[in-house]
Amino acid sequence: MQNLTKSNTNKSIPNISSPTPAIFFDRDGVVNIDDEYIYKIDDFVYVNGFLELFKECKIKGYLLFVITNQSGIGRGYYTLSDFLKLSDFMQEDLMKKFSFCFDKIYFCAHKPQENCTCRKPKAGMIEQASSEFNIDLASSYIIGDKESDIEAGINAKIGTKILFSKVAFKKLSKENSKYEDNKISKADFIIDNLYKANSIIKVLN
């Protein structure tokens, strides 16, 4: 498991005395459009609705993290340096737009067959974040576009799991099922656009 902070610096982790809720974002498919193994800045495009959601989550008082499987590094499709450059670009762009960015980016560079402890659906990245930032996981959220994201949230005991998938949402609508009764996903909510996530995420007191 590896992690980095804004601009790949050794930014110190804040001393958070009381547990604080967080929002965990998958990257490809939630933050940026997933066109398979995105590592070039020219190919990086935000998902519609992400920027608005990101801003609202910060206003509501949450810590903000990326947790992303990046097996393309382990497979040799791109390098660690490529990933870090794109991460720096994303963080700096968010800083320009909002004067804040993700509190930290966690990523797993392993191939699936390596059976590491960090690759989603395992909870290693979330557990590391929780340990470093004293996160109230029961009051936190995870937003992902794959069932492995939801399973990682379950394994980490995150309170609310949101699946962002137009395909799953369409299937749920056809079944006319309640979230708790559906057989499509273990998520607490299934949405077809990120604007809907804002109404799910509560304002912190």
Image (cartoon, rainbow, N blue to C red):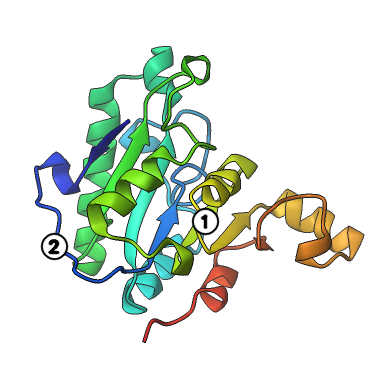
Amino acid type, residue under disc 2 in the picture: Asn
**Is residue 69 or residue 78 the one in the foreground?**
69
Helix, strand or loop under label 1 = strand
Vertical relation: 151 (above or below) 76: below
Vertical relation: 82 (above or below) 31: above
* Quarter-of-image position of residue 188: bottom right
Q: Residue at x 43, y 45 (%)?
A: 27
**Is residue 158 or residue 58 the one in the foreground?**
158
**Is residue 25 or residue 33 the one in the foreground?**
25
What residue sits right under mark 1 in the picture? 143
Seen in the image, is 11 located left or right of residue 84? left
Query: Disc 1 or disc 2, which is closer to the eye?
Result: 2
**Is residue 79 or residue 179 the one in the foreground?**
179
Q: Position of residue 200 (x, y in %)?
A: 57, 74
Q: Give the mark nearest the N terminus, 1 or 2.
A: 2
Name of the residue lying farthest toward the bottom: 205
CB within 8 Å, label 1 to label 2: no
What residue sits right under mark 2 in the picture? 15
Say which mark, if any, is on residue 1.
none
- How packed is label 2: few (under 14 Cα within 10 Å), some, or many (20 or more)? few
The answer to whether one can see residue 154 in this image is: yes
Q: Residue at x 42, y 82 (%)?
A: 203
Seen in the image, is 155 located left or right of residue 116? right
Q: Quadrant of the N terminus?
A: top left
Helix, strand or loop under label 2 = loop
Q: Residue at x 19, y 46 (%)?
A: 5
Q: Quadrant of the C terminus?
A: bottom left
